[in-house]
Amino acid sequence: MADLTRRQFVRRAGGAVAAAGLGSQLEWLAGCGSGGSSPPDFTRLARELKGLLVLPADRFYRAVSTPLNHRYANVHPQAVALCASADDARKSLLWARDNEMPVAVRSGGHNYAGYSNTPGLLISFDRMKRVVVDDAHNSLVVEPGARNTDVYRGLQPHGVAISAGRCPSVAIGGLTLGGGVGFSSRKLGLTCDRLVEAEVITADGKVRTCSERENSDLFWALRGGGGGNFGISTSYKFVTHPVSDVTLYSLEWDWAHAPKVFAAFQEAMAAAPDEFSARIGMGRPGQPNGKPGPPTVTALGQFFGPKKELVALLDPALTAAKPKQQLIARRTFWQAKNYFFATTPYGYYEVKSAYAHQPLSSAGIETLARWVDKWPGSSNGDGAGMAMFLSGGAINRVPADATAFVHRDDFALIAMETTWAAEDPKSVSRRGLDWIEGMADALQPHVSGFAYQNFIDRAQKNWQHAYYGSNFKRLEEVKRRYDPDDVFRFKQSIPLS
């Protein structure tokens, strides 16, 4: 039986991929194979696809096969199926099962742990980015390869939104299946909370519609159960919400004020209404010489309300220490979205996460500040650090067992990251990895033991509990029903119990 890896994300390929010729692929296929073993019959799959099968000899192979996190770029797919339809994904899956070949499925390329890479067949949704808004039914239908920027572009003319992510290149597929946290989540709910229907290809090749009425157990699992566990999701339908203006803020303080500003900002977070979102972070950049740049403490977010009310909400942090940079301004929802857009780490990186049930104590804050201060450095400009994202609001009003997303009683999500570059010596990456593990371990007394499944981490301890908590056993039941042969399997996939 094929060992299929996590269905997640794909590296951007660009429209030029369509120019690659099928004839050259078939010539390459005719000559592949060695050592007396029969090569897989890629020619049959290439002819069946409406999309394109990209092979190692093709011009655009590297662009469509390389994962975003280059730590895992040393695994090379035998082929990449650039699907033009859900039926292409179905045919690719069945072909892989017939040929006992491992498969990974990508939608946006942001799998932190590299589970979207495979030495077998890579199924890519990079060409499936359709976005359709239905004003009459307040709905949005999206193909899995649509990035945040595609989704927002489709929504903006209609004046409606869902709670999507901050990074423009993250695809809706992985974002939704793992929960989906963004600057509108406290007001509108998680991305998965707006989902009302999904189309899924299960391991038997059947195309299933999932909603509260059909395949409701699978629909439950899709909302926070993580990508790659139960099938290949090929379409998502969301309910939309009207949006207009917001007030955004961006603040930066001198590093010397980090502990007291962090504590004061948490005070503001704890008292805030649903309309308020927040990210406060401490970090430092990498520099060309490999040494760490100066540390900073910053805060960023938006408020679905007037500037005067936002200033009052921020008052504890604004009076704890005067920001050296400050922006508080009224903007349209779409202008604010553009202001907040930020890329995920690039090059080589490790990301860890934790949930806090309540504001961090002074000891917890000082722990974070101390570890940020002693990051060993690298030449990657993304550097290293931590960020706290306020939870609560609409997120926490959904019962923990209503969807697979169990993190419904938390105060905040904490993310930690370290980055390095290809030109850095191995000693740099080793020091960075030791640093982030040390930081995460030191933080444990101050957090809940839970972690965010969309920040999936190969080194996460007790990941079954950390990602899914009390929902894990029910996820195992869904797994047994829809994937009894454990076709969709990777290191941290839902197992057959």
Image (cartoon, helix red, strand yellow):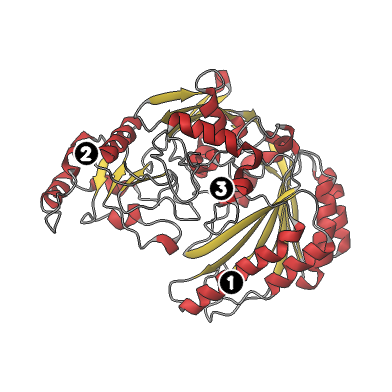
Badge 3 element: helix
Q: Residue at x 57, y 52 (%)?
A: 455
N-terminal of the two: label 3 or label 1? 1
Question: Which label belongs to residue 45?
Answer: 2
Q: Neighbour class for label 2 at 10 Å: few (<14), some, many (≥20)?
A: some
Q: Amino acid at mark 3?
A: Asn
Locate residue 265: give its quadrant: bottom right
> Taking 216 as reference, is 162 above or below it?
below
| Residue 304 seen in this snapshot | yes
Badge 1 element: helix
- Give the farthest residue toward the bottom: 289
Judging depth in this view, the residue of 482 and 241 nearest the camera is: 482
Q: Neighbour class for label 1 at 10 Å: few (<14), some, many (≥20)?
A: some
Q: Percent from the top left, x then y, of residue 427?
A: 50, 79
> Taking 79 as reference, is 133 above or below it?
above
In front: label 1 or label 2: 1
Badge 2 element: helix
Q: Residue at x 26, y 42 (%)?
A: 52
Q: Residue at x 78, y 63 (%)?
A: 365
N-terminal of the two: label 2 or label 3? 2
Q: Quadrant of the N terminus?
A: top left
N-terminal of the two: label 1 or label 2? 2
- Horizontally, is 240 left or right of 88 in the view? right
- For the residues bearing labels 2 and 3, Cβ distance under 8 angstroms: no
Q: CA distance from mark 3 to mark 1?
A: 22 Å
Judging depth in this view, the residue of 90 and 484 nearest the camera is: 484
Q: CA distance from mark 2 to mark 3?
A: 31 Å
Question: Which label belongs to residue 434?
Answer: 1
| Residue 155 seen in this snapshot | no
Q: Amino acid at mark 1?
A: Asp
Q: Which residue is mark 3?
A: 454
- Horizontally, is 110 left or right of 244 in the view? left
